[in-house]
Amino acid sequence: MAAAGALTACYSGAVTEVTLAQLTAFQSDYDGRRVLTGGTLRTHPDPRHYWIEDSALNRVALDSDEMLDHRVGTTVTVRGRFAYDREAGRSIAVEAFPD
């Protein structure tokens, strides 16, 4: 039982570097995992929301308390917890922008 707890603690703290294409293709596999990924930051004003996308238009919404308007149109790297829900789609609860 202690080994299982240690494995869970290690897994929940680990960060997996992944592309947006991988996140969209295997979204259920990454659900709940901490990821590091990047893409071009985009936004929509009503209601204000942000996402990152790649050249193939693989998109993931960003859940961040930070106002990001000054970075829209630039390539950003994001670290956070990925979530996938059939109704709500794909998102990352942003922990940091390490770039």
Image: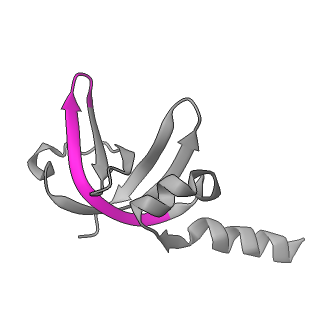
Give the prevailing secondary structure in the magenta stretch: strand
Q: Please state which of residues 68 and 42 is positioned toward the viewer in this rendering.
A: 42
Q: Is residue 84 above or below residue 12?
A: above
Total count of labels? 0
**Which part of the image, by quadrant, shows the C terminus?**
bottom left
Q: Is residue 8 above or below residue 52?
A: below
Q: Quadrant of residue 56?
A: bottom left
Does residue 39 belong to the magenta stretch?
A: yes
Q: Residue furthest left?
A: 70
Does residue 52 belong to the magenta stretch?
A: no
Image spot of residue 71 (x, y percent): 13, 52
Q: Please state which of residues 41 and 12 is positioned toward the viewer in this rendering.
A: 41
For the magenta stretch, what is the residue range?
35-48
Image spot of residue 46 (x, y percent): 23, 22
Image spot of residue 63 (x, y percent): 38, 43
Residue at 63% in and 51% down: 28
Residue at 72% in and 68% down: 8
Q: Quadrant of residue 40?
A: bottom left
